[in-house]
Amino acid sequence: MVDIILDNIKKSFGSVQAVRGVSLKVYDGEYLTLLGPSGCGKTTTLRIIAGLEKADSGEIYFGDKKIDFNVPPEERNIGMVFQHFEIFPFLDVWDNVSYSCKVRGVNKDEIEERVSKYIHLVNLDKYVDKFPFELTAPQLQRIGIARALATGAKILLLDEPLGALDQRYRDEFRVEMRKLVKKLNITAIHVTHDQDEAMMISDRIAVMRKGSILQVGTPGDLYIKPNAIFVANFIGESNFVEGEVKSIDKYTQIKLHGGGPIIFSKNKHFYKRDRVIGSIRKEFVKIKEFIEENKLKDNNLIEGNINNIAFLGSHLRVNIELENGDIIEAKVTYPPSIQFEVGSKVYIKLHPENVLLFPYPEDLDYELALE
Ligand code: ATP
């Protein structure tokens, strides 16, 4: 069993509280990602697990075993992959990969077996005799992964491992990384600030901000049920509107600020007159043509004017200005079912289950900042 448990881990660098009481359980065989903006404490958390950094307080367990903070990385049975890891330019692929086993004193036969196994698993068989200068960036990164795995580690720690790769290689590599971890049945903790990467690669994601974990969940959980404005904003793309709860029956009715329209939400954890923020994913904003009779049939339509249209190939971004001046952006799959024109009047249809409500925060700008 190699569940990894972090219990109230704290770490400061002088006056900077890099990690502020992080508790997390990563299950045996799980691919978990620490996701958050730059400086939120992801790398420090990973380095504490690795033994490259000592926590100020808290506890770490690998399975049932409590890990003393003084245990060095090489005695923790972990493999590590970094964005910029050390490749020895004068060693070929085989020697670069076998290096980690040699320094750990693994015997010769075992090294042969492990190195050939992992070189094969990362698709470098054809390149065993090549030197780093003869290889591409993705191939060099494969060396790093094979080297980390060849240690025989059951835990793999990855810090922005794909950060140095071109976008076109990244998607492919993400899929491969996940397959590899699953095939080997190891536990992986991956650090990234890239939400697409986290969504593609992870069983679960821990969203971090300012040294704390805000939410841990599957990619689907975080997308459908974000527990904070920051998470709703960081994962995917959302519109945020401000309003006040007018009534609660089948749905919660929210009157948008500044004389705006009423919108409906399925979220019922609020009271009349509560000030709230509504969060609506851009792809859930449906645009309907402006036809007078619509008004009579459906009271969940909001009037607005298209004030910008951007074409992005797979989809359009259509901005609609409401009567109170709020702009709602819709992501519309291309080709759209209706023709949009700047200046034209339209309706927006929002399904109540797609309008998430959050209490109005003390500092909205802070909650909406992506840092
Ligand atoms: P990034 O993606 O930019 O690496 P991160 O989320 O991984 O960010 P950390 O690298 O863990 O964040 O840093 C968290 C905070 O701790 C930052 O404010 C950073 O400047 C600070 N910090 C990290 N390491 C040190 C250090 N060795 N000395 C001083 N401050 C540090």
Image (tube, helix red, strand yellow):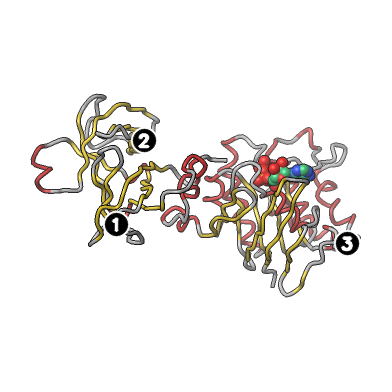
Give the foreground label among 2 and 3: 2
Mark before the other along the chain sequence, 2 or 3: 3
Compared with 280, 113 (above or below) is: below
The quadrant of the picture showing ligand 1 is: top right
Residue 166 appears left or right of 254: right
Query: Which residue bears the numbered disc 1?
Result: 272
The residue under label 2 is which amino acid type? His
Asked whether 255 or 89 is in front, the reply is: 255
Do labels 3 and 1 touch, CB within 8 Å?
A: no
Mark 3 → mark 1, Cα distance in angstroms: 68 Å
SS under mark 1: loop
Residue 268 position within the rendered picture, expressed as x and y whole percent measured from the top left: 32, 61
Mark drawn on residue 315: 2
Query: Which residue bears the numbered disc 3?
Result: 106
Q: Quadrant of the C terminus?
A: top right
Label 1 neighbourhood size at 10 Å, few (<14), some (14-19), many (20+)? few
Q: Ligand 1 near label 3 (Cβ, under 8 Å)? A: no
Residue 237 appears left or right of 161: left
Mark 2 → mark 3, Cα distance in angstroms: 53 Å
Do labels 2 and 3 touch, CB within 8 Å?
A: no
The residue under label 3 is which amino acid type? Val
Residue at the image point whose x is 52% and y is 60% from the top: 217
Total marks shown come to 3
Residue at the image point whose x is 62% and y is 53% from the top: 34
Residue 202 appears left or right of 184: left
SS under mark 3: loop
Asked whether 178 or 357 is in front, the reply is: 357
Residue 128 position within the rendered picture, expressed as x and y whole percent measured from the top left: 78, 45
Residue at the image point whose x is 56% and y is 43% from the top: 171
